[in-house]
Image (cartoon, rainbow, N blue to C red):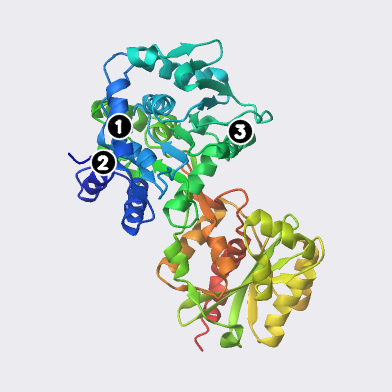
Amino acid sequence: MPFRNCILEYYNKITRGEIVAGKWILMIYEIVVRGLEKGEYIFDAKKANKAIKFVENFCHHCEGREDLLKLELWQKACLSVIFGIVDADGVRIFREVFIVIGRKNGKTLFASAVIAYMAYLDGEYGAKVYCLAPKLEQANIVYDNFFQMIKKEPELGELAKKRRSDIYIEEFNTTIKPLAFNAKKSDGFNPHLVVNDELASWRGDPGLKQYEVMKSALGARRQPIILSISTAGYENDGIYDELMKRSTAFLKGNSKERRLLPFLYMIDDVEKWNDIEELKKANPNMGVSVSPDFFKEEIAIAEGSLSKRAEFLTKYCNIKQNSSVAWLDYQTIERTSVAATLEDFRGCYAVGGIDLSQTTDLTAATVLIEKGGKLYAFTQFFMPENRVEAATAADGVPYDIFIKRGIVTISGENYVDYNDVYKWFVMLAQQYEIYILQIGYDRYSAQYLVNALNDYGFHTDDVFQGENLAPVIREFEGILKDGNFCIADNNLLKAHFLNVALKHNMETRRFRPVKIEQRARIDGFVSVIDAMTVRQKYNAEIGEMLKNAG
């Protein structure tokens, strides 16, 4: 009898409309199925079904009931991807698993079952498993749940010994240990599995550092996993936001991630937060571990209170108050490429934008020129000579190639010489007779550059980088998706566009652009938006001239 393929079964039921799933879940299964069809991945049905059978035959409920777990199709599909998608050597592809799911969908039980499988049946002798959280009390939740789960199964329970600080399985020399944050003590970690519980509550820098410590420690194992399971939360700019941005960028085809596996169970339409069918997208266990009536009761409460509504959106819809997701997909940006030169726009009217480097690395300057109903972007980057090597290594970007192509100008030794930015705009005016009617700049820009531009005769205006950019970004998104925005032979600018995430404020219904990850750069994009802002702001005065129709 052939092994069951729960991946294809689940995917087919989604595409046929038999199962309600959100866009992000559809995307990850499309990536997996497409990867299998192309031969990029191999599906080991035996390994996938081994994990499923172990969970259903050995793992027990431990609160309110004691019977064996019965996995739903979405859980079987999830386990099948984690344990059954392998490379040519039979080694698991995915190492970072990120599951975002609503409350009451059995995430603690699922995590405990994964621990049990990897501790007992994964074949890793001397495995170290960590249940990680900011405080030991929180780390103990999954840890204790796992112990209660295996105690109810004699075959597993008799092999495990609970000691003062860990659980030890002598037959496999395996330890399972709860762990509180201590990023300074990275020595000695050699994890086969790390389970991060309620990642959305991990605060800022300590959470980011601890995650990176554990992630970097995975390298000593053949096929380790770092599993993060969480409902959305309230902390901003922490590891949850970082993983969300990385995950959505990967799902949209904007990153080269290969080991990341995101399962983002979220609603698609925030306006339908009180619709039961929409809620199924964030709560795949609706009707199993949690009833539709429960949600109807919670909706009634939330409809009568703004604070309760915000809580409902966060905990049951997985839409946090300030959520960050990747903005544009690769295909949209790739379509913007055109082989255009400044010579093609001699004598045209334009607007400009500047994003000056806040540090020492990269500055971007842009002119936007409209012709034939399309907007053309020409962007010049500036980088100090002594920063090229370090920036290349840190960013993973071949700046030396971009320098040779003239996309990046060497400017200054340790800091960008803003006089070079001034000279670039003057060159456009003098050499190509491009009439720049307004230049937008970040209000934190160097005043002497602004003064120099004004003294030459350019008109400048400061642009506040915040949620006030939402109307400009909405307009710009429409231009992009209509195919009316063109990037003139500049792959670095395209990369900066793909590094943009939008941070949504659900209260104000506004958003602001942020980086998809800390090391990503969006300077070129910001310079374009600065130009778009003055274009929109002064449209009544200069809009007709900017069309270059005459």
Give residue 22's position: percent from left, percent from top. Answer: 32, 45
Q: Please indicate, yes or no, whether residue 14 appears anywhere in the rendered image.
A: yes
In the depicted structure, whether residue 409 falls above or below residue 265 = below
The kind of residue on which mark 2 rests is Cys
As measured in the structure, the alpha-carbon distance from the residue carrying label 1 to the one carrying label 2 is 10 Å
Residue 407 at x, y = what percent?
65, 73
Relative side of 216 to 174, left or right: right
- The residue tagged 2 is 6
Q: Which mark is residue 499?
A: none
| Residue marked by disc 3 | 210
Residue under the point 45% across and 19% down: 171
Image spot of residue 144 (x, y percent): 45, 16
The answer to which of 182 and 355 lies nearer the viewer is 182
Say which label, 3 or 1, has the lower sequence index. 1
The tally of labels here is 3
Q: Residue at x 55, y 10 (%)?
A: 164
Q: Which mark is residue 52?
A: 1
